[in-house]
Image (cartoon, helix red, strand yellow):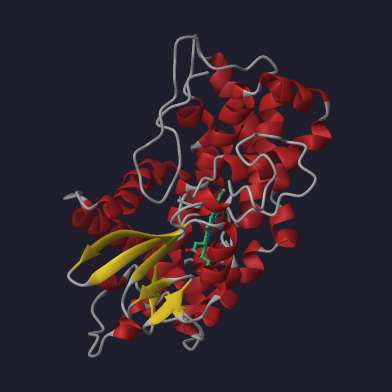
C-alpha cells in the first residue's frame, strides 16, 4: 500500500468513505492538519447534549479540537510531564519486583502478559488516579469491552459502559466527601470550581486515562519482550549493556507499535489529499505501524535493531494529540524490561508455543506470551 496506493480507500458506506494513510510523511501531515477534525459533531447541526453514558467518548480530549482540547489537556498535562513522572520510578520499580517475585514462585511456563505486563501499568495508573487497584479486574473487562467495540459485534458494550459509569459515580461521590492526594480528587475539585471542566468531561477524562493506561503499555512491554526473544543476539547485547535499554524501548515501539492506528479524523471540507478526492464527512485513519516501517524514513525498516542511531517513530502519534502518557509509558517500559533482564536473565519463549496477535483494529497486542 505504501508503494502503490498510499491513501487507501478502506470502505464506502452511504456515501461516506473511510481512508487509511500509510506513508510516514503523509501520516504526520494528516495528524498535524487542523481541518482533519477530531470532533465530528462540528459537521452536524442540532447536537443534543445527552447524558454521561452517551457522551463518554465525545467529551474525551482525544475526540475534541481546540479550544476545548487545549483546555482539557492543560488541566492534566502537569501530572504527566517527564519531571513529575520521573518521581514514580521507585514505586514502579517496587511493583515490577513484586510481580516478578510472584511470577517466579509459579511452576512451569507462565503468561508474561497476565502475570506481569498487564498488572504493572494498571497498578500504576490506578494509584495515580486514586482508583482501588483491587478493582482492576472489573476495569479490565470494561476497558476491553470499550476498545473492542470498534469491531462492531459487541452486544455487552452498552451494559459495560453503564456499569463503568455507575462505578465512577460511586467513586466520585466518595472522593467528593473525602478528597485524597490523587488525580481524581483534583479533577473533582476542578469540576466543582467550574470553568475548567464540566460534569460530562470529568467522566470522559477518567475513562480516557483508565483505558489509555490499561490497553497500551501492556503491549509495549509484551511486544518488546517478544521482539527481544525473537532476536536472541540483540537480547544478549542488551543483557550485557543495560545502557541500551532506552533504545530497546524505542525500537520496540517502532517495530511492534502497540497502537496500530490513530483514532479517526474527519474531513471538514471537500479537498484533495495526495491525489485522492476526500469529501466532507469522510473518515481517515493514520496507520502508525505502517509509517513506522516506511523504508523512506527508516533504513532496513523491517529489521529489529536496538542500536538505531535515530528513531523518530510515530508510535505515540504526532501533533496536538501526541500521547499525553508517553513519558509514563516509556518509564514503565524501561523499568519493566530492566527488571526482567536482571531478575530472569534466561527468560525465553516457552517451548512449542507460537504467540498469536489479538484480532483488533486499533491496538496491536499478543493474546498470550508464554515464557
Ligand atoms: C493519545 C499511543 C500510553 C494517555 C495517544 C495517541 C497515541 C497513543 C498514538 C494519539 C492518538 C491519535 O492521535 O489519534 C500510546 C502508546 C502508549 C500509550 C503507544 C503505550 C506504549 C498511554 C498512557 C496514558 C496515555 C500510559 C496515560 C495514562 C493518552 C491520552 C491521549 C493519548 C490522554 C490523548 C491526548 C490528546 O488528545 O491530546 N496515545 N499511548 N497513553 N494517550 Fe497514549
Left or right of 47: which side holds 21?
right
Picture quadrant of residue 171: bottom left
Picture quadrant of residue 101: top right
Q: Position of residue 353 (x, y in %)?
A: 44, 15
Q: Is residue 138 above or below residue 20?
A: above
Picture quadrant of residue 268: bottom left
Closer to us: 321 or 80: 321
Residue 180 visible from this viewpoint = no
Q: Position of residue 206 (x, y in %)?
A: 44, 64
Q: Position of residue 346 (x, y in %)?
A: 67, 14
Numbered label tally: 0
The residue at 46%/87% (across/down) is 194
Q: Is residue 252 above or below residue 55?
A: above
Closer to us: 189 or 298: 298
Residue 227 visible from this viewpoint = yes
The residue at 59%/23% (across/down) is 230
Q: Is residue 165 above or below residue 309?
A: below
Q: Is residue 262 above or below residue 289?
A: below
Closer to us: 345 or 309: 309
Left or right of 105: which side holds 153?
left
Q: Position of residue 152 (x, y in %)?
A: 22, 53
Closer to us: 218 or 227: 227
Amino acid at each position: 500500500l505504501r508503494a502503490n496506493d498510499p491513501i487507501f480507500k478502506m470502505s464506502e458506506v452511504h456515501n461516506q468513505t473511510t481512508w487509511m494513510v500509510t506513508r510516514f510523511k503523509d501520516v504526520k501531515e494528516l495528524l498535524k492538519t487542523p481541518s482533519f477534525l477530531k470532533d465530528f459533531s462540528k459537521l452536524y447541526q442540532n447536537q443534543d447534549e445527552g447524558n454521561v453514558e452517551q457522551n463518554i467518548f465525545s467529551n474525551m480530549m482525544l475526540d475534541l479540537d481546540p479550544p476545548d482540547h487545549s483546555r482539557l489537556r492543560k488541566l492534566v498535562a502537569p501530572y504527566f510531564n517527564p519531571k513529575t513522572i520521573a518521581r514514580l520510578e521507585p514505586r514502579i520499580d517496587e511493583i515490577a519486583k513484586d510481580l516478578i517475585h510472584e511470577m517466579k514462585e509459579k511452576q512451569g511456563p507462565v503468561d508474561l502478559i497476565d502475570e506481569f505486563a498487564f498488572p504493572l501499568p494498571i497498578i500504576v495508573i490506578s494509584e495515580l488516579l486514586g482508583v482501588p487497584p483491587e478493582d482492576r479486574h472489573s476495569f479490565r473487562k470494561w476497558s476491553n469491552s470499550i476498545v473492542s467495540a470498534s469491531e462492531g459485534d459487541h452486544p455487552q458494550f452498552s451494559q459495560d459502559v453503564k456499569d463503568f459509569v455507575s462505578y465512577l459515580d460511586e467513586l466520585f461521590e466518595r472522593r467528593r466527601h473525602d478528597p485524597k492526594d490523587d488525580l481524581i480528587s483534583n479533577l473533582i475539585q476542578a469540576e466543582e470550581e467550574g470553568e475548567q471542566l464540566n460534569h460530562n468531561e470529568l467522566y470522559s477524562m477518567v475513562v480516557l486515562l483508565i483505558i489509555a493506561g490499561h490497553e497500551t503499555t501492556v503491549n509495549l512491554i509484551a511486544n518488546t519482550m517478544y521482539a527481544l526473544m525473537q532476536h536472541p543476539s540483540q537480547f544478549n547485547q542488551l543483557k550485557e549493556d543495560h545502557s541500551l535499554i532506552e533504545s530497546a524501548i524505542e525500537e520496540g515501539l517502532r517495530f511492534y507499535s502497540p497502537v496500530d492506528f490513530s483514532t479517526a479524523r474527519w474531513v471538514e471540507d471537500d479537498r484533495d489529499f495526495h491525489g485522492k478526492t476526500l469529501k466532507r464527512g469522510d473518515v481517515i485513519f493514520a496507520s502508525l505501524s505502517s509509517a513506522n516501517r516506511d523504508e523512506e524514513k527508516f533504513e532496513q525498516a523491517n529489521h529489529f535493531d536496538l542500536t538505531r542511531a535515530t528513531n523518530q517513530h510515530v508510535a505515540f502519534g504526532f501533533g496536538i494529540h501526541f500521547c499525553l502518557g508517553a513519558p509514563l509509558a516509556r518509564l514503565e517500559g524501561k523499568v519493566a524490561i530492566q527488571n526482567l533482564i536482571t531478575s530472569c536473565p534466561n527468560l525465553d519463549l516457552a517451548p512449542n508455543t507460537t504467540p498469536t496477535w489479538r484480532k483488533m483494529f486499533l491496538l496491536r497486542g499478543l493474546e498470550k506470551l508464554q515464557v
